[in-house]
Amino acid sequence: MTVATPRVCRPCGQVITGPADGVLVRVEPSISGPPRPVYAHLDHANLAGPDAARLRLLADVLARKLDALGGAGGE
Ligand SMILES: [Zn+2]
C-alpha cells in the first residue's frame, strides 16, 4: 500500500489538509531526482517567495542582452 506524502505549506511549514486549502506555487528542479512541487496554503501563496530558477534564467537573459548592447556601464 502506498501512503501519499502530505503536502506541506512552504511559508508556514504546516500540513495542507485538503485540496481546497492549498495550491501548487511552483516546481523546483532537483539535482538528485525529479522536480519537486512546492505547495502553499491559499492564504500563504503570496509568501512562497520568488522562483529562484526563473530569477536565474531572467538574470542570465538580461545579462546576455546587456552584453550584446556593449556591456553594463562599460566604456
Ligand atoms: Zn501556510
Image (cartoon, rainbow, N blue to C red):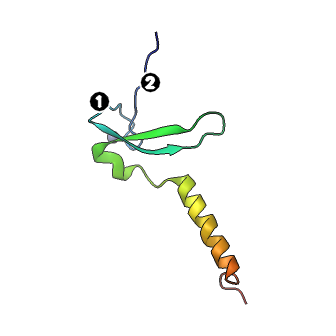
Residue 40, compared with residue 47, is above or below; it is above
Task: Please tell me which residue is depicted at 37% across the width and 51% down the height of the picture.
Answer: 47
- Report which quarter residue 15 is drawn in: top left
Please indicate whether residue 59 sits to the left or right of residue 49 in the image.
right
Residue 54, compared with residue 64, is above or below; it is above
Please indicate whether residue 64 sits to the left or right of residue 55 in the image.
right
Query: Element at badge 1?
Result: loop
Task: Give the class, few, some or many, for how many residues have Cα within 10 Å of label 2's Cα (few <14, many ≥20).
Answer: few
- Which mark is first along the chain, 2 or 1? 2
Residue at label 1?
A: 18
- Report which quarter residue 6 is drawn in: top left
Residue 33, compared with residue 57, is above or below; it is above
**Tag 2: amino acid:** Thr
Residue that sits furthest to the right in the current view: 75
Query: Relative to the observer, which residue lies in front, 51 or 10?
Result: 51
**Tag 1: amino acid:** Gly
